[in-house]
């Protein structure tokens, strides 16, 4: 596959490699590569962190509102929302597809609610970053389970092969079982013939 990239004018090969590395890191952050179950678990952690952030931010705002501040007009019922995000974070950590999809849907529904009722969904960067983190966790959990089905499990034998018993060699002269590789007793030096 041929890939064309725009290359900024550079003076050295090192500057070019830094540009390529930066381009890869941005792409990898937006749509992380998932190759196996371990990388799927690592990518799914994005959703765990996003859900934990949503829960912590909600708890913080409700606490500040209880102390007398008037931020986003959230009351104590928003703690139910925070509890849902905590449950979603635990579910995504356990690689639950349902939790990952629920996290994405709940977050997007909250943004729509905030636009309709408050006119402010949050900063664009925050919304974009958290949405991408939830999307990554959805991809990762689904691919984790798909990869789990495709990993071949060796069939278990009905009758496992019998292992012959290990024969112990004992020196006739001294009765020691400490025999060296060349069939020589380590205790008395006698050569053992089998």
Image (cartoon, rainbow, N blue to C red):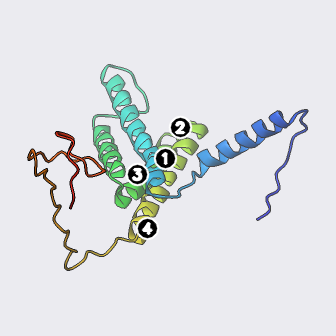
Label ID, residue 111 = 1
**Which tag, 4 or 3, sits closer to the chain's start?**
3
Mark closest to the chain's N terminus, 1 or 2? 1
- Distance (Cα) linking label 2 and label 4: 35 Å
Give the Cα separation between the discs numbered 1 and 2: 8 Å
Q: Earlier in the sequence, mark 3 or mark 2?
A: 3
Marks 3 and 2: CB-CB under 8 Å?
Answer: no
Q: Secondary structure under badge 3?
A: helix
Query: Label 2 near label 1: C-beta < 8 Å?
Result: yes
| Nearest to viewer (mark 1 / mark 4) | 4
Quadrant location of the N terminus in the rendered image: bottom right
The reply to whether dot 4 and dot 3 touch (C-beta < 8 Å) is no
Q: Are marks 1 and 4 in contact (CB under 8 Å)?
A: no
To which quarter of the image does residue 53 belong?
Answer: top left
Q: Quadrant of residue 14?
A: top right
Circle 4 residue: 146
Q: Position of residue 91 (x, y in %)?
A: 32, 51
N-term-proximal mark, 1 vs 4: 1
Numbered badge on residue 103? 3
Q: Viewer-proximal residue, 143 or 156?
A: 156
* Residue 147 screen position, x and y as percent: 44, 65
- Please identify, in this view, whether the residue under mark 3 or under mark 1 is nearer the observer: 3
The answer to whether residue 106 of the structure is visible from this angle is: yes
């Amino acid at each position: 596959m041929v890939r064309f990239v725009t290359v900024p004018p550079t003076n050295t090969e090192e500057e070019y490699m830094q540009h390529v590395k930066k381009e890869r890191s941005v792409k990898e952050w937006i749509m992380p590569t998932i190759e196996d179950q371990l990388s799927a678990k690592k990518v799914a952690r994005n959703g765990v962190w996003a859900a934990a952030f949503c829960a912590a931010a909600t708890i913080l705002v409700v606490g500040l509102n209880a102390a007398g501040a008037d931020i986003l007009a959230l009351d104590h019922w928003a703690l139910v929302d925070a509890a849902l995000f905590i449950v979603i974070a635990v579910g995504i950590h356990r690689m639950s597809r349902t939790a990952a999809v629920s996290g994405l849907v709940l977050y997007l529904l909250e943004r729509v609610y905030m636009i309709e009722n408050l006119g402010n969904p949050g900063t664009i960067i925050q919304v974009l970053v958290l949405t991408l983190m939830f999307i990554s966790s959805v991809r990762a959990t689904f691919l984790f389970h798909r990869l789990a089905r495709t990993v071949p499990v060796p069939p278990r034998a009905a009758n496992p092969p019998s292992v012959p018993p290990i024969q112990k060699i004992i020196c006739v002269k001294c009765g020691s079982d400490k025999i060296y590789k060349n069939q020589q007793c380590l205790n008395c030096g006698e050569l053992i013939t089998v």
